[in-house]
Amino acid sequence: MKRLAAITLLLGTVLATAHAADTKTISIGAAQSDGQALPISLQNETQAAINRGLDWLKSQQKPDGSWSKGDFPALTALVLQAFAGSSYPGRESVISNAVAFILSCQQPDGGIYKSVPGKGGGLANYNTAICITALHATGDKRLAPVIQKGRAFVASSQHFGDDVYSGGFGYDRDTGRPYTDLLNTYYAVEAMARTADVEDLRAKNEKRVDINWAETVKYIAKMQNTTNSDTNNAGGFFYSPTDAKAGTATNQAGTVFLRSYGSITYAGMLALIYAQVNRDDVRVQSAFDWAAKHWTLEENPGMGDQGLYFFYNIIGKSLAAYGRDLVPRPDGTTIPWRVKLAEKLISLQKITAENGNGYWKNETGRFWENDPVLITAYTLVALESLR
C-alpha cells in the first residue's frame, strides 16, 4: 500500500500534463527533406486507422493499467508510446493507468522489469530501455527521478571487455556470460538519446549518467557488413557478432559471413543517427543504400514474415530520422515511402465486426509477433511517424 501511495503521489496531475507531451525531445541533427507529404485523403485514412487502433488498445487495457504479458512491462510501454504520440480523446486516463503500472515495476536497482525465471530472466535491459523511453514521451517532468534511475541501470548494463561483444547491450546484464546484440543496443541507444534532457534536472552535486557513446558506435559498426562480404549484403546489418538471425553466406574468397536483413539494418542506421553519427558518414549512407536496394513492404528482407511488424515500425522511425522522403531504386525511380507504408499498413488492419475497432497481427509468431497488442503498438507508432 505504501508503494501504491508513493506512485499515486508521483503521478500527481499526470492527466493534465500528459496532454501537453512533447515527444521530440532531442536533436538528432539537421535532416534533409524531399518535401513529400501524404495526400490529404491518405492523411485522413491514416488518422482513421490510428483512431481504430487506439480504440482497440484502450479496450484491451487491464485493470492494473498493463497490456498483454504483465511480466514484461515493455509491452505496456510500447502501447504507452502509441497513446503518448497521439491526440486521442480521453487518452489521459489510459496514459495515467499505464504509467502507474510501469512505475510499480521499478526495482531497487533502478531497472524497470520483473524477475522471471529462465534464460535472460526478466529481460531487464530491454524492458528498462523501452519503459524509460515511453515514460519520457508522456512529457511529465515529475517522472524524471524514475527515468534517471532507469538511465543509470541501462548505462551500467553496457558491456566492456576484450571480446566481440564489447560496447554493446544485451537483454540482461546478469546473464553470467558476455552477450550483446544490435536490437538491444538500438533500444538502449534510443532510450539514452531521447531521455538525455532529464540529466539537466539532477541536483548540482549529483553525477550525470550516460553511456560510452564512442564504444557504442564501434560496436554498432561491427554489426555492419562491408564490401568484404558481397554486393548483396554490404552496408546491411546483422543481429550479433555470433548470431545473424538471417543465416550465413560465403563470398567469392570462401569466407563465411553473417547475412544482412531488413529490420536490423534500419535499427542499426537509426542507432547511428541517435549516436550523432553524421548522415553523410559512410556507415549511415551505406545502410540507407542497402535499404534502398532491398526496398519492399511485402516482407522483412532476409527474414520473410518473421519480425515483419517490427520491420514496419523501424522503417517509419528510421527514414523519418534520416530525413529522406523518397527512396531511390536501382532503376532510377523513387519510392514515396511514407505513402507506400501508410497504404500498406492501412490495408493490413483487421476490423472487429462488433464495434469497428481495428488491430494488427502477424500470423508468424517468432519474436512475439502473434501478439496483436504488441503488433498494434508497433504499427501505430509507425503510422504516427508518418506525420
Image: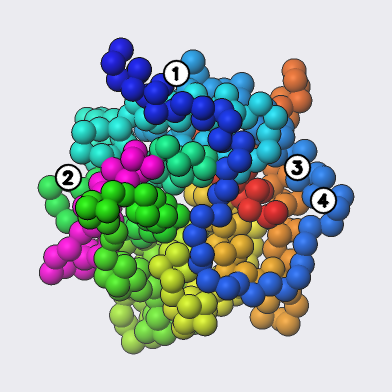
Q: Kindly tell me whether residue 73 is visible in this rendering.
A: yes
Three-letter amino acid code at disc 2?
Asp
Q: CA distance from mark 3 to mark 1?
A: 28 Å
| Vertical position of residue 314 compared to residue 139: above or below | below
- Dot label at residue 42: 4
- Dot label at residue 174: 2
Say which residue appears at 56% left-offset and 35% top-offset.
17
Three-letter amino acid code at disc 1?
Asp
Quadrant in the rendering for residue 353:
top right
Q: CA distance from mark 3 to mark 2?
A: 42 Å
Q: Residues within 10 Å of mark 2 (few under 14, many from 20)?
A: some
Which residue is under mark 3? 47
Say which residue appears at 62% left-offset and 69% top-offset.
323
Image quadrant where one finds the N terminus: top left
Q: Kindly tell me whether residue 347 is visible in this rendering.
A: no
Q: Compare marks 3 and 1 and give the one earlier in the sequence.
A: 3
Q: CA distance from mark 4 to mark 1?
A: 36 Å
Q: CA distance from mark 2 to mark 4?
A: 47 Å
Secondary structure category for the residue under label 2:
loop
Q: Compare marks 2 and 1 and give the one earlier in the sequence.
A: 1
Nearer to me, 277 or 372: 277
Horizontal and vertical percent position of residue 285:
52, 79
Compared across the picture, whether 363 is left or right of 35 comes to left
Badge 3 vs badge 4, beta-carbon distance below 8 Å: no
